[in-house]
Amino acid sequence: MTYEIFLKNLVKLDSRFIVITAENRAAIRNLPEEIGENFIDTGITEQTMIGMACGLALRGRIPVCHALASFLTMRAYEFIRTDVGIAGLPVKLVGYVPGFLSEANGPTHQAIEDISLMRVIPGMKIFCPSDEEDMLIGLEKVLTSSSPYYIRFNNLKPVVKHNTNFTEGKAEVISWGSDITVLTYGTLLRQAYEAMIILESEGLSVRLINLRTLKPIDEELIISSAEETKLIVSIEDHFLSGGLYSILGEMFLRHRLNIDVLPIALKGKWFKPLLIRELLEYEKFTGRDMAINILKFYQNCFDEIKIRSMI
Amino acid sequence: MNITRDEIRSLKETALKVREHIIRMSSGGGCFAGASLSCADIIVYLYGKYLNIKPENLNDPSRDYLFLSKGHDVPALYATLAEFGFIKKERLNNHLKASDNIYWHPNISVAGVEFHSGSLGHLLSVASGVAMDCKLKKAHNKVVVILGDGELNEGSIWEAMLVASAYKLDNLVAVVDRNHFQANMETEKLIPLEPLEDKFESFGFAVATINGHSFTELHHIFSQIPFEKDKPSVIIADTVRGKGLPSIEARADRWFCNFSSYEVQMLLEELRGNQKADIKSETLIVR
């Protein structure tokens, strides 16, 4: 099953679904032939696409909108906030190549403030799958939800076997450790997984969590993990401000928790445009880089572990 | 579809009442009176004659649609909705009261309001989405959207025109309330729009220009919709900002009006053709 086939089947089952794109067809190239009139391409017009999606939704349709994540969330931001958000229409926004997935396109194409922008819109929910399988597991509930949704599109190959139960606001626990909690979403789950393996070889027990939805977020699991483990690490291909790290800050403040949190995020600058492999190395987002960072931070906090092989 | 003299007389009477409501809403906090008065006749005509939208058919998917993209003229819409029984007339007295949702731009909780607006340049695309769905369902709903002429500065209008034209939405009608002003000054002195017909034509719309205060002309032109098969239509309705009140008509500084209750009484007299009002309230309050 691919994303495209999933959408085709969905439209065939329920003609309320309309696939609409601002000429971003990379993931849905065969759909025009497959679903005919339920496919609309508005050309390079993110604002009009969102406005039309709202009109379609007023008539009972469920529009699934596709555009590059940066242009979708920023060029059309006021349309999303004002037309989708104020009315609370069930418009689904699929952001293509979010975060590091824009690779060598350059800063114009880097959606690394998208979570920040989307989460402040009342009623807007956010789904950040870590790969295509994870995305397909969640997609049916996300698309049939009566809420507007922002989806950080991800069709990478999976590196873990996913739990096929999806509930919005419930994270997927990849491993139940007791020393360090690693929270992540989207693309960087694979690097976080590599980091976990390295950390465990260093004798640390890691609780690795794939958050899946950032809004609503699995607050219960995060708070219990904050209480049960010694350190929280947040990993994201997003600016430090406004994303997961900010969500955690707000949450811990609300719960009056004073705990150590290590953020691994983009700190105040756009990333070097490169193919993903070189990019991760250049920006120090490989699993190994993450493991070293986490170990150093852990050592500073607790001073009880010797780093053996790595440094 | 004909229009009788009695119907025209009735529309004129309704429009006069709508203007009275607008004048009353221009007090105690005020409203965008000039832009409301300029499109009052258009809105009264659309609800009173052309469109199949009634208080009792709002949930009927085969009814027509009217979107107000220049949302600051909402007093004209609310007054018309009150006159045609969508909302109680007394509700207009709730203007700017915390107990209701009647404020300077449309709120969707008021019966008859299709969608909220206020940020300019949005509803041509929203209306296009509705028109698109009607087309896909081979339904015959008419979809009308009222745009301001100042609003045409927004790039999203022209973007939506490209798309509506590409998808041959001939069930879509844009009406431009061409009152020749944007907030602070004349359109042609700030960002000139002319030749406007040519611009619309080159964007694939079929165009007509009429006097937006003449029910005869409004009816004559709307009876010909769609002007051309497979083309969306646009009607440039030539209007006067502040129409009906010579003391504020076509005055750049009468954008947002907040009159005293004495001035409201004088303006109501002026509207009925009596003595011109002596307006002392401050002008050019930009909201």
Image (spheres, coloured by chain):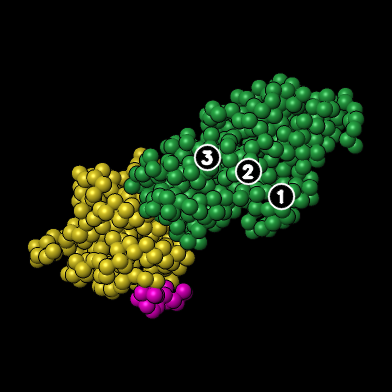
Chain colours: A green, B yellow
User: What amino acid type should be assigned to the residue bearing mark 1?
Assistant: Ile
Residues under labels 1 and 2: Cα distance? 12 Å
Along the line of sight, the residue nearer the viewer: A99 or A162? A162
The quadrant holding residue A254 is top right
* A162 left or right, relative to B268: right
Residues under labels 1 and 3: Cα distance? 24 Å
- Residue at 59% in and 44% down: A155
Q: Which residue is mark 2?
A: A156
- Residue at 56% in and 38% down: A135
- Mark 3 and mark 2 lie on one chain; the one further toward the N terminus is 3
User: What amino acid type should be assigned to the residue bearing mark 2?
Assistant: Leu
Q: Which residue is mark 1?
A: A276
The quadrant holding residue B254 is bottom left
Chain letter of disc 3? A
User: Badge 2: few (under 14), some or many (20 or more) residues near its Cα, within 10 Å?
Assistant: some
Chain letter of disc 1? A
The quadrant holding residue A306 is top right
Residue B66's tag is: none
Can residue A153 be seen? yes
Q: Which residue is mark 3?
A: A1
Along the line of sight, the residue nearer the viewer: A300 or A37? A37
- Residue at 55% in and 29% down: A164
Q: Are marks 1 and 3 in contact (CB under 8 Å)?
A: no
- Residue range of the region highlighted in magenta in the rendering: B187-202
